[in-house]
Image: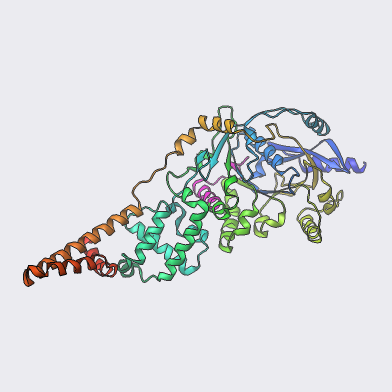
């Protein structure tokens, strides 16, 4: 048996699957695409997460498009976090062109065009399905990690959540959490100290500054109601295709904290709500996170630990997470170790550091008798990639340089009118378009403070009347000025609050 025949046999055996599988393309040896040497990924292993990497312009987006199309065709929904805004064309049929026909002839895969059901999601004021979550849904631990708080500051956040729970004050948006911080520092200081312990104003000041920093990145648009229901990501259309949910993030590329806040909250919500699936035949949902380095470069150690933990655990719920970035070194080692599928497009070596990074990248892939991995990484063409996956038994497949199949949908973005057409037909846009601002901590605290001020004013008026009766009418103007000073004294209000609290409890 020749070297070529040996290689084809290795690919055929290594990528065979008893169950349903996705075909990525055909294997390449010595620069030649081999017909019928198919590189396939079993649906059963797609909840083992993955990495799609490569230099700009090498074909990463088209690879994600191919994967999403194949998943949708099997009735598996997809969530694509689209930072660059170049993925939306999947909603429209592609166009068969000579270079596509030639590519598919080489790997002996028939080419057809198709379109796929799409929902356009947004975190900002762009047109689309608005995604929101409440502060309460985050909980004190996750909210503290998002803000990168130390243990003392996180403890204060826990007190805030406990106080709001005890007093049935919903924490919905950032104005709620800011209001409660101001309250426990000023008017409610004595009440908090009596029931929950003393809180340093310097600590609350630090927490408030970090919240404002998050707010300046646009988080005020994200926190609030109505909250997005993750079940709406799991829809199948009337033809049995899974919906491809595209979260358009083009306007928050310079707001990595908001991006990581959303991503972590979404993963946590999915993990909490989805039932355990065990060893299922296919994933329930696959999530693609584009430009993943934006998350990891800005994340605190606590946030990285949280991401790593969720990535480890969420696959038991039937959820696959795929990170897209230029270089695998962008992904923390703890996360990288959890990624079963690796699709590596070409890397470019312009400097000594580039060459060093390529050697490190090559070490992340299985050794091969047929490739010098570090050399192949720099010689791959557009739409070609090194692939290694897990077979149905969880064993890594042989390394295969692969000529990737072309997307069936449009390899370009939607026009504004096409985006509007999708949104006009969307049931979810209508469902989440209304901004609900029900009574929450902000309004309840304002009412509470108003009652306090009114009670203090009433008491002072009574005192003033008593003085007028004892001293005569000539002292009225002097007393009036005294009352005005008292009413504007925050110190007096805080002192009186302890008495009023007992009155409210009665």
Residue 212 drawn at (x, y percent): 47, 59
- The figure's colour scheme reads rainbow
Residue at left 62%, top 57%? 296
Please tell me whether residue 264 belongs to the stretch shown in magenta.
yes
Does 418 sit left or right of 370 as displayed? Answer: left
Does 430 appear above or below 401?
above
Residue closest to the eye, 301 or 46 = 301
Please tell me whether residue 109 belongs to the stretch shown in magenta.
no
Q: Which quadrant holds the C terminus?
A: bottom left
Does 173 sit left or right of 65 as displayed? Answer: left
Can see residue 278? no
Region of the chain picked out in magenta, as a range: 262-286
| Quarter of the image where one finds residue 120 | top right
Does 34 appear above or below 388?
above
Residue closest to the eye, 240 or 113 = 113
Residue 258 drawn at (x, y percent): 54, 53
Residue 343 drawn at (x, y percent): 73, 47
Q: Identify the residue at the far right of this view.
A: 2
| Quarter of the image where one finds residue 287 | top right
Q: Which quadrant holds the N terminus?
A: top right
Can see residue 413? yes
Residue 430 drawn at (x, y percent): 46, 34
Question: What is the tally of numbered marks visible in this picture?
Answer: 0
Does 99 appear above or below 290?
above
Residue at left 19%, top 67%? 481
């Amino acid at each position: 048996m020749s070297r070529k025949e040996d290689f084809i046999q290795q690919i055929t055996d290594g990528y065979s699957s008893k169950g349903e599988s996705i075909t990525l393309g055909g294997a390449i040896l010595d620069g030649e695409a081999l017909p019928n040497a198919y590189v396939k990924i079993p649906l059963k292993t797609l909840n083992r997460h993955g990495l799609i990497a490569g230099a700009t312009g090498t074909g990463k987006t088209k690879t994600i498009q191919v994967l999403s199309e194949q998943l949708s065709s099997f009735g598996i929904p997809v969530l694509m976090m689209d930072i660059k805004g170049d993925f939306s064309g999947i909603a429209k049929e592609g166009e068969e062109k000579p270079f596509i026909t030639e590519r598919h002839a080489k790997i002996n895969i028939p080419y057809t065009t198709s379109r796929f059901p799409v929902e356009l999601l947004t975190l900002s004021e762009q047109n689309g399905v608005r995604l929101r979550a409440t502060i309460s849904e985050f909980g004190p631990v996750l909210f503290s990690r998002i803000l990168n708080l130390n243990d003392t500051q996180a403890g204060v956040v826990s007190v805030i959540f406990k106080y709001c729970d005890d007093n049935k004050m919903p924490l919905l948006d950032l104005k709620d959490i800011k209001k409660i911080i101001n309250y426990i520092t000023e008017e409610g200081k004595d009440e908090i100290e009596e029931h929950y312990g003393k809180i340093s104003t310097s600590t609350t000041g630090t927490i408030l500054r970090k919240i404002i920093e998050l707010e300046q990145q646009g988080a005020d648009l994200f926190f609030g109601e109505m909250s997005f229901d993750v079940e709406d990501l799991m829809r199948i259309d009337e033809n049995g295709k899974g919906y491809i949910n595209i979260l358009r993030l083009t306007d928050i590329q310079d707001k990595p904290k908001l991006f990581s806040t959303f991503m972590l909250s979404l993963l946590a919500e999915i993990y909490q709500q989805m039932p355990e699936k065990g060893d299922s035949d296919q994933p329930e949902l696959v999530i693609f996170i584009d430009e993943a380095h934006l998350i990891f470069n800005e994340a605190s150690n606590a946030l990285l630990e949280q991401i790593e933990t969720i990535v480890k655990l969420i696959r038991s719920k039937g959820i696959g997470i795929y990170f897209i970035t230029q270089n695998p070194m962008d992904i923390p080692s703890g996360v990288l170790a959890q990624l079963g599928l690796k699709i590596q497009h070409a890397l470019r070596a312009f400097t000594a550091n580039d060459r060093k990074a390529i050697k490190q990248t090559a070490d992340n892939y299985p050794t091969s008798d047929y490739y010098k991995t570090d050399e192949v990484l720099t010689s791959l063409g557009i739409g070609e990639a090194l692939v290694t996956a897990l077979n149905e038994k969880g064993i890594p497949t042989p390394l295969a340089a692969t000529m990737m199949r072309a997307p069936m949908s449009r390899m370009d973005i939607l026009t504004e009118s096409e985006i509007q057409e999708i949104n006009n037909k969307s049931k979810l846009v209508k469902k989440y378009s209304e901004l609900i601002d029900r009574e929450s901590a902000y309004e309840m605290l304002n009412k509470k403070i108003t009652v306090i001020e009114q009670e203090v004013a009433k008491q002072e008026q009574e005192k003033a009347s008593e003085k007028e009766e004892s001293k005569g009418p000539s002292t009225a103007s002097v007393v009036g000025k005294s009352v005005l000073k008292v009413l504007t004294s925050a110190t007096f209000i805080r002192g009186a609050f302890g008495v009023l609290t007992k009155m409210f409890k009665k």
